[in-house]
Image (cartoon, rainbow, N blue to C red):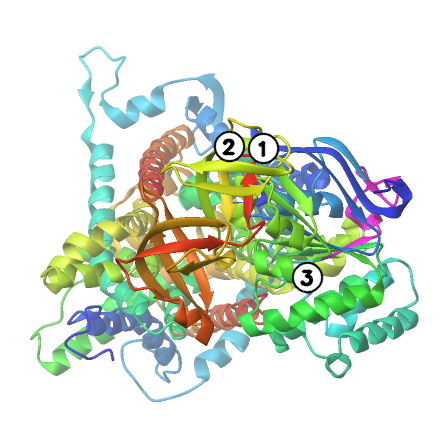
Amino acid sequence: MAAGAAGGGVTSDTYKAARPWLLLPAWSVLALLSLAPVLMMLVYSFLTKEFRGGVIWEFSLAAYDQFFFDRGLFGDEPPKIQWTYLAIFWRSIWQAGSATLMSLLIGFPTAYFIATRPARQRPVWVFLITIPYWVNLLIRTVSMKFLLREQGPLNDFLLFTGVIDSPLQIVNTNLAVQLGLFYSYLPFMVLPIYAAVERYDFALSEAAADLYASKWTTLRRILLPAIRPGVIAGCILVFVPSLGSFLAPDLLGGARNFMIGSLIEEQFKGNAGNWPFGAATSMILLSMVLVILLLFARQQARSENRGRG
Amino acid sequence: MSETRAQNAIDVQGAVKRFGSFTALKNISLHIRDNEFFTLLGPSGCGKTTLLRIIAGFEEVTDGRILLYGDEIEALPPNRRPVNTVFQNYALFPHMNVLENVSFGLEMLGQAKAAARARAGEMLELVRLEQFAERRPAQLSGGQQQRVALARALAPQPKVLLLDEPLSALDLKLRKAMRLELKHLQRETGIAFVFVTHDQEEALTMSDRIAVMSEGELQQVGEAREIYERPRNRFVADFIGETNLLEVSVTGSADGSSRCRLDGGQELTCDAVEGVEAGAHVHLSIRPERLFTSQEPQRADVLTGTVVENLFTGTGISTIVALPDGPTLTVRSSNSERGSKRIIAPGQECCINMEAGAGRLLID
Amino acid sequence: MAQGKLDIRSYRGFRALTFLCLVILYAPLVVVTVYSFNDSNSITTWDGLSLRWYVDVFTGPESAKFKTAAVNSFVIAITAATVSTVIATLAATGMIRAGRFRLRTLSFGLISLPLMVPEIVTAVATLIFFNAIALERGLLSIVLAHIVFCIPFAYLPISARMQGIEADCEQAALDLYATRRQAFTRILLPLMTPGIVSGFLLAFIVSLDDFIITNFVKGAGVETLPTAIFGAVKRGIQPNIMAISTLLLGVSVVLVTLSYFVSKSDSPK
């Protein structure tokens, strides 16, 4: 009845007068230590590199030039597209996409199964899914490496059961990186889909069954469209962090399976020591992520409107 | 009626409340008397809760004045108003036990803890919950929580108690029992109660006076009986109880009576209403329990029609009668021997007899 | 009822896939934990149960290094979690209990910014920023960086809890003559406690676990547990690393479980 109090997560205006003071710490810390650094990174990407790290305060397009073009846009010969770095980006997209697909194939049935448990059991299931997420990513990736090693427990198990005759070489392959990413972010796929299925009104499925739809048709034609925002959210939550990941490709992939994260890291921590190039690569990665998130936000807003319509 | 300001518990003068472009209250003026059980009644969204929250101090008026026993209070924050509220969902503090809840207001007023607790104990006795003092609110039933909320709001001895649909969360039986209890509490404490509800039965049984609201406006203020029997307009007649609304044209008035003609040509006599002159096209409200059917006319005012259906409703029988030329009337008779004898089979012609004074002309 | 052929909710195979999912999630953790109790010098052969690698972590040649790293990790985590929890609690009150306002969406975007920006980008940006303002890299730089990404993790459970507390509660307090400050300290804050504790624990875990950002903004010679472990793993997985990983894993699991039960306890409804 108090028209002002409804919706949007605002539940009262009790502390209206104090609002600026309540928000000031968060605003200042985040503006200074989250927003400003990103802007500073943008600036650095247009500066000249200094050898062995750091920058010279002189405007330069060299970083972006190096990323996209061979022999330089401003050289004597006509510019050619430089494929080295684009290939790394493409591999990152491919790896992240594969991990996302794997997560979806396992995560969707899991989320669905959990959401159809009795209401009192559900929080326990959800808790079981989330625990591994809170374990140190480094430790999880190391554990994965240990498990997948040529002489590791997985190969031991497969040899023992006779599924294979000789140990599988998984570490240092694309597959190992995909498995590592899949394992790292699997809980992110389960949770939003779970939330969507839990809100889903199963009377719709009953209505479909009543109108002669088979179970799988019902799943495809009724349930999936209804929970699509949750599925998309899950895919994004897996894809985005996979895209910029560093640990999985670094520990599981080896030198031949370089991804964006490693490329960036090398500019600051490794031998390359090219800060403007690292900043430019980070900017390109960030732009990709922001575009994905923007498309996602638009899609969510649209489906929300449809739900209300 | 004397309008001495000091005698009124609350004076609302020209209160307007706007939320952005939405006007929740459109120029409301009303008086709530000392020591009265006053009810704000209306459908959801009519502005009754907004008005209550304005009196409590949770909303500011956009325009207008609010007086509490003659003092202007519209600028005071809620913690400076000697007015307490019983919230719809009770709003008991879940982390405090019952006694701490009830003594909270007294402690905030600066009373020593021991004195506050002692007074809180008395309040719990008043609502017969003294044995639950140590319990947490979550360990109480809905009805008990309700009584804690009452005790908490009454403990600081407010000048006016505000109740925001306090019974709506209870089941029907408990609700009926609480009606009585509330009424008794009001008599015992002598504090003016302002009660908000959308339940007309609740309003009729409990209130000294009722204000019917709709779309941010007062429709009618008066005693329960007056509002039920002499509704001022169509909204009030329709909202309170069940009624038959007939379109009529007034053909003439004399000696405090008006003659009105229905579309089908039949005529009735009813009390004249100020503002409804001859030639007016208005609605006539007739309560179904003030009508009865018969084969032959038995009253001065009689309509004839055809029985469509007899519906058994448990306590009574509703007979639906179609008048010539369209409109249907509902006639209710009690589920008694006398009532049952009057039942006429569907399809048959019948007379509908109207008790004197049963028809009420409405200013639209 | 779940097994019936008529149950339109159940799909064949979903249960099996769910168990597969749990196996995948837990197998690596279980395997590392089991092998941390291995008596062997090599990580490949199993020589029976033993605590020797745990003893090694605390008394072995690398114990001093691990001890310093652990102290650093906990000091950083406690500081970052405390500061971010205070900031998040105030911010949640400003966002949820102070009416609507024009900058609200923007504020929420700012709070969740650290979640949206890929970690490696945050790491690069923070390193560059500290370099630009000439902030010396050491414990302070790590704490500052951690506070930022801890804020959203502390904010989420706190704001969720706050949304679950009915506004009526404070209004009742105001109605009963409490000032706004009293309504905050005597009503809202006590009711918020589980959310605040849960937020603190999550922030603590996230800080304790962080590797990428720490790795960028730490100075030479300053190590936290994850950076120390990473350095060791780069030279090859050793049994003592499995033991220390298991310890860290245990801390996370215990804290998350604690956070889960705290946030479940004494629910406002």
**For mark 2, does the 10 Å Cα neighbourhood hold few (<14), some (14 to 19), or many (20 or more) residues?**
many
Residue flagged by tag 3: what amino acid is it? Met
Direction left: furthest residue? A165
Q: Position of residue B52 (x, y in %)?
A: 69, 47
Residue flagged by tag 2: what amino acid is it? Val
Tag 2 near tag 1, CB within 8 Å: yes
| Disc marking residue B206 | 3
Picture quarter with the N terminus of chain A: top right
Residue C134 drawn in magenta: no
Q: Which of the two labelled residues, at mark 3 and mark 2, occupies the earlier sequence position?
A: 3
- Label 1, secondary structure: give it: strand
Span colored in magenta: B67-85
Spatial separation of the CA atoms under disc 2 and disc 1: 8 Å
Q: Is residue B178 visible?
A: yes
- Residue that appears at 60% across and 58% down: C165
* Chain letter belonging to callout 1: B
| Disc marking residue B253 | 1
User: Which one is in front, B229 or C209?
Assistant: B229
* Chain letter belonging to callout 2: B
Tag 3 near tag 2, CB within 8 Å: no
Image height of C46 relative to B255, above or below = below
- Label 2, secondary structure: give it: strand
Picture quarter with the C terminus of chain A: top left
* Chain letter belonging to callout 3: B
Please identify the quarter of the rendering in which residue A213 is found.
bottom left
- Label 3, secondary structure: give it: helix
Q: Is residue B171 visible?
A: no
